[in-house]
Amino acid sequence: MKILLFTLEYPPFKGGIANYYGNLVRHCPKDNEIFVLHNNENKLLSNKIYPKWIPAFFTLYKSIKKNKINHVIVGHILPLGTVTFLLSKIFNFKYSIVLHGMDLEYALKRKQKKYLAKLILKHAQTIISTNSYVEKKMLNFLGSKFDHKSFVVNPGVSSRNVESFGSVPSKTASKQDGRGTWNAGEFSNFRKKHDLEGKFILFTVGRLVRRKGQDRVIEAVQNLREIIPNLYYYIAGAGEDEMYLKNLAKNNSHVKFLGAIDDAEKDLWLKNCDIFIMPSRDINGDVEGFGIVYLEAALAGKPVIAGRSGGVSDAVVDYETGILVEPDNVDSIEDAIQELYRNFDLRQELGDNAMKRAISSFSWKGQAGKFFEICGN
């Protein structure tokens, strides 16, 4: 089958959507021939003409003719879905729509966009959501009679993550630190550098925006200082709410901001923390679609505290690989921290389960195989 991925975001463009499509193409089964039409050079959209997707129409038209495409994967329902739907009436090809979250939210904001979105979705051969939350929202909009062509394919974890953390949970983890075994020298040097000995470490990495829930964790850590005196919270990342978060934590020396960090440093923090925590919440429809970082923490064998919102429950199974909390309820977050602090065996069990699940269920090879099998049916 000759497949064309039609997307606005694709590597080296950064972000979860670009990462999703880059990995799908990289792991596409060899019995398919795949082409990519992206907007990295601003060839699909123009602000000088109306509608702005006119260049995308002619570019897609040429690519379908030249490469004899018989299936188009639409990476963004609007405006690329409009282009694909119109051309599917000229050429006899099938198309699949991929939904991530905010793309669907955007499409449902205005009457005209809702009409277009419904038309595009109804005529798609398949609709693939990257998490079950988006699928539920789409079916509520489109109607349950279309559930036969609706599927969920979550993101996967990269081979870099698996190689960095190993392939099986460590059976030699020490009861003193519970962190398993990695390069001893690197591990020791990192702990000395950041003065981590004797500390119970919470860690978050992500954009510094309120949706990620760092503010609620800061409040929880402040409230727990007398109960857990060795509790420390390390926050990595940058974003528009950095000053808001720093002001919230300005009188708490147990909250540390690390700034933006690279993948190697992120891996070291995941290895050294006791709990990965990111209680993401829904703010005006802006939700966590999935949270690949939860799987990265899982590969490090860490239990997770996550917010019960958006598509997070696809990545974190409550009391199997982590604990889901009510993200706007600081008491709920405090209770989860205390439970895991007091119960080493539970931390170890959740972390081991999380690692096994991430490796067995979220390899990119497996996810891509599932994705293209759905498109081919």
Image: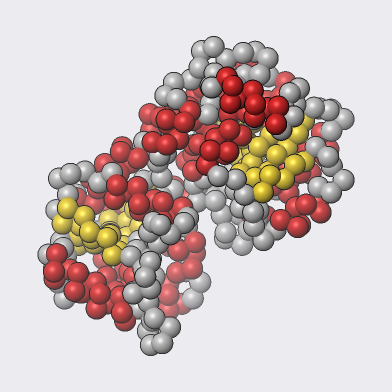
* Horizontal and vertical percent position of residue 60: 24, 72
Can residue 131 be seen here?
Answer: yes
Residue at image position (53%, 29%) is 300
Can residue 99 be seen here?
Answer: no
Residue at image position (40%, 39%) is 158
- Give 358 or 246, whichever is nearer the viewer: 246
State the residue lying farthest toward the bottom. 49
**In the figure, residue 319 lies in which quadrant?**
top right
Judge from the rendering whether residue 59 lies leftward or rightward of residue 109; answer left or right: left
- Give 6 or 315, whichever is nearer the viewer: 6
Q: Is residue 308 above or below residue 13?
A: above
Q: Is residue 137 above or below residue 119?
A: above
Q: Is residue 87 above or below residue 316?
A: below
* Horizontal and vertical percent position of residue 243: 75, 57
Question: Which colour assignment does the render follow?
Answer: secondary structure
Residue at image position (69%, 34%) is 202
- Give 110 or 280, whichever is nearer the viewer: 280
Judge from the rendering whether residue 66 lies leftward or rightward of residue 262; answer left or right: left
* Horizontal and vertical percent position of residue 39: 36, 68
**In the figure, residue 222 lies in which quadrant?**
top right
